């Protein structure tokens, strides 16, 4: 099974959409003596189109799949582009950045984050694309330009690790 796109804010993979649909239905009706429909059942029902659709939004946090003008995005390639863009401007939470700084300072392969030992892979997963600026001291330690981001730093470490 392929990986699902997840909300850049909270990581949920469920998105709500409000929409009204148009149905073509074949109905069997029975009339009472007063001419009212007494009994009716749908023999066949086929959705023939979409009347209107709101933007998809994250079920958990309400993050919306909309373009710059606030228009709903529904085309698959546009959806992928939106998720990618959102991932790029993502800024990792402070505690993850601080844990990464600890990781850079220590000589071991893992550090403790909330009672769990985590390593480079964990940081790559969470800091790739992070636009926060890494403090200058760490930049020189890593031999990357001053003003580099956390994203740049994990990228460099990941590259070195895969050599
Ligand atoms: Zn969300």
Image (cartoon, rainbow, N blue to C red):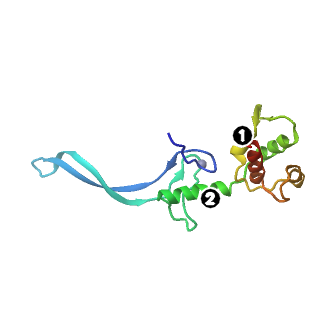
Name the residue: 55% across, 48% down: 5
Evaluate if marks 1 and 2 touch, with contact meaning CB atoms under 8 Å apart: no
Total marks shown come to 2
The dot on residue 46 is: none
**Disc 1 and disc 2: Cα gap in Å?**
22 Å
- Residue closest to the eye, 78 or 12: 78
- Residue closest to the eye, 156 or 89: 156
Which residue reaches farthest front? 163
| Residue 118 left/right relative to 5 | right
| Residue 10 left/right relative to 78 | right
Q: Position of residue 142 (x, y in %)?
A: 85, 50
- Residue closest to the eye, 147 or 115: 147
| Residue 28 left/right relative to 4 | left
The quarter holding residue 48 reads: bottom left
Q: Position of residue 60 (x, y in %)?
A: 57, 46
| Residue 10 left/right relative to 97 | left
- Residue closest to the eye, 36 or 65: 65
| Residue under label 2 | 85
Relative to 141, residue 68 above or below? below
Q: Position of residue 79 (x, y in %)?
A: 52, 57
| Residue under label 1 | 121
The quarter holding residue 67 reads: bottom right
Relative to 50, residue 100 above or below? above
User: Alpha-carbon neighbours of circle 2 within 10 Å: few (<14), some, or many (≥20)?
Assistant: few
**Helix or strand or loop: what does disc 2 sit on?**
helix
Name the residue: 9% across, 48% down: 33
Q: Quadrant of the C terminus?
A: top right
Closer mark to the observer between disc 1 and disc 2 = 1
**Helix or strand or loop: what does disc 1 sit on?**
helix
Of the image marks 1 and 2, the number of the one nearer the N terminus: 2
Which residue reaches farthest left? 33
User: Alpha-carbon neighbours of circle 1 within 10 Å: few (<14), some, or many (≥20)?
Assistant: some
């Amino acid at each position: 099974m392929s990986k699902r796109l997840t909300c850049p804010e909270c990581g949920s993979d469920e998105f709500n959409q409000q929409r009204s649909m148009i149905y073509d239905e074949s109905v069997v009706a029975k009339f009472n003596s007063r001419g009212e429909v007494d009994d009716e059942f749908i023999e066949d029902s086929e959705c023939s189109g979409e009347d209107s659709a709101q933007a998809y939004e994250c079920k958990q946090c309400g993050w919306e799949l909309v373009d710059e003008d606030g228009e709903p995005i529904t085309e698959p390639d546009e959806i992928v582009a939106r998720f990618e863009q959102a991932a790029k401007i993502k800024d990792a939470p402070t505690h993850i950045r601080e844990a990464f700084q600890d990781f850079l300072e220590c000589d071991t392969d893992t550090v403790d984050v909330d009672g769990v030992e985590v390593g480079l892979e964990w940081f790559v997963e969470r800091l790739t694309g992070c636009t926060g600026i890494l403090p200058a001291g760490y930049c020189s330690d890593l031999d990357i330009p001053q003003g580099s981001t956390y994203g740049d730093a994990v990228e460099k470490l990941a590259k070195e690790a895969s050599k």
